[in-house]
Amino acid sequence: MNFSALILALPTRRSTTRMRVWRALKESGCGVLRDGVYVLPAGAHGAEVLTAMETEIALAGGFAMTLDLKLRSAAQLAEVRKLFDRSADYGALVRDIGAAKSALPGLGPRKAQTALRRLQRSYDRLSQIDFFPGQAARQAGEAIARLKQGYDEAYAGGEPRTSDRRLQRADRARFQGRVWATRADLWVDRLASAWLIKRFIDRDARFAWLQRPRRLPRGAVGFDFNGAEFTHTGNRVTFEVLLASFGLDADPALAAIGAAVHFIDVGGIPVADAKGLETVLRGAKEKTKTDDALLAEAMRVLDLFYSAYKPGAGA
C-alpha cells in the first residue's frame, strides 16, 4: 500500500500560517510519522490537502515537499497504520453517545435532537478520516444507531412508514375547524403540511404537537406519523398526500413546493430550490424555541415561495 507524505519546515514568525496548516492537516486525518513529516494513504479522501499546504507553506517562506512514500515490508506498513488508529477517538465518542442516550428522557425533543445531530456529525467526521476501519468503528456505528432508536422511541415515534393504501379524495367539509395533530419537533414535511392545511384546507385549523403520536387527542386529525389519517403513501410524502387528497395537486405552485419538500424529506430527484428552502427553514428552527414559533416563521417562508412559484410571478 502506498502513502503520500508532506515534509515541512514552517517559518517561526508566521503563527497564523502555522495554526492554519496544523488545523488543515489534523482535520484531514494525517498521521505524524515524525516532526515535520505528515502522511496519508495515497488517494485517500482529503489527500489533496498535502499539495495545498505545500503551496501555502512555500508562499509563507517555509519549506515543504510532497512525496510518494513506498513501504518495503509488512512490518513498515503495520507501523504506519498505527498512526491512523482511531480506537481511542471512537471510544470517547461511544462514551458521549452513551451519556446522551441515558439523558434522552429528560432532555425534551428539541434538545435531544440537537444532541443527536451533534453526535452524528462527530461520527461522520471521524468516519471520514478512518482509513482502516475495524471493530471500534462498528461499535460506534451501532451506538449511534441505538441512540437514534432511543430518540424515536422517546419522542418521534419514528418517521412514518410508507403505506400502500390507495389515496381517496377527502371531503373538505368534514375537515373544517378541526384540530390537526402531528409529531412534535417539527421539520420540513410537517411544517409544509401544516402550512398547506392552514392556507388551503382548513383556515380555522388548530394544531397539536404530540410527544407520543399514539396519544391522539379525541376528534383530532392526525398527519405525518404511522397510522395517521394523512401520512406517507406510496412514493408520496405527507405534503403530497394532502395535495392529492384535497384536489390541490393541479396547482403548479403547490406542486413545485411539494417537489422540494419531497427531496428534502426523503431524497430522490434533485430540486433546484430545495437547498435554499432547507437552509431558510433550518435557520428558523435554530432561531425559534417552540414549535408554534417555528410554524409561524415557516408560514411566512412558504407564503413567499408560493408567491414566487405562482404562474405569472416575476413577469
Image: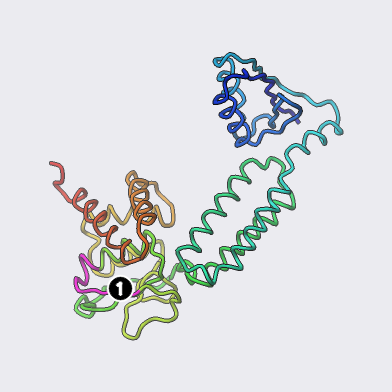
In-front residue for pair 110/70: 110
> Identity of the amino acid at label 1?
Phe
Q: Dot 1 surroundings within 10 Å: few (below 14), some, or many (20 or more)? A: some
- In this rendering, the answer to whether 278 lies above or below 45 is below
Tell me the SS state at disc 1. Answer: strand
The stretch in magenta equals 198-208
State the image quarter where residue 289 is shown. bottom left
Coordinates of residue 212 in the picture (x, y in percent): 45, 76
Disc 1 designates what residue? 207
What is the residue that sits farthest to the bottom in this orientation?
A: 218
- In this view, the residue in front, 5 or 307, is 5
Q: Residue at x 34, y 54 (%)?
A: 284
Q: Residue furthest front?
A: 13
Percent of width and height locating residue 117: 51, 55
Left or right of 241, for residue 117:
right
Left/right placement of residue 243 relative to residue 115 reads left
Rendering colour mode: rainbow
- Image-quadrant location for residue 132: top right
Q: Is residue 73 magenta?
A: no
Residue nearest the observer in this picture, 97 or 198: 97
Where is residue 305 shown, x and y percent of the image?
A: 24, 51
**Residue nearer the viewer, 238 or 288:** 288
What's the residue at 41%, 61% (across, down)? 235
Query: For this view, does 190 lie left or right of residue 56?
Result: left
Instruction: Judge whether 166 appears above or below 13 on screen.
Output: below
Q: Was residue 201 drawn as part of the magenta stretch in this picture?
A: yes
Q: Residue at x 59, y 23 (%)?
A: 53
**Is the residue 271 above or below the residue 297 in the image?**
above
Left/right of residue 157 with respect to residue 253 in the rendered view: right
| Residue 244 placement (x, y as % from top left) | 28, 66
Q: Quadrant of the N terminus?
A: top right
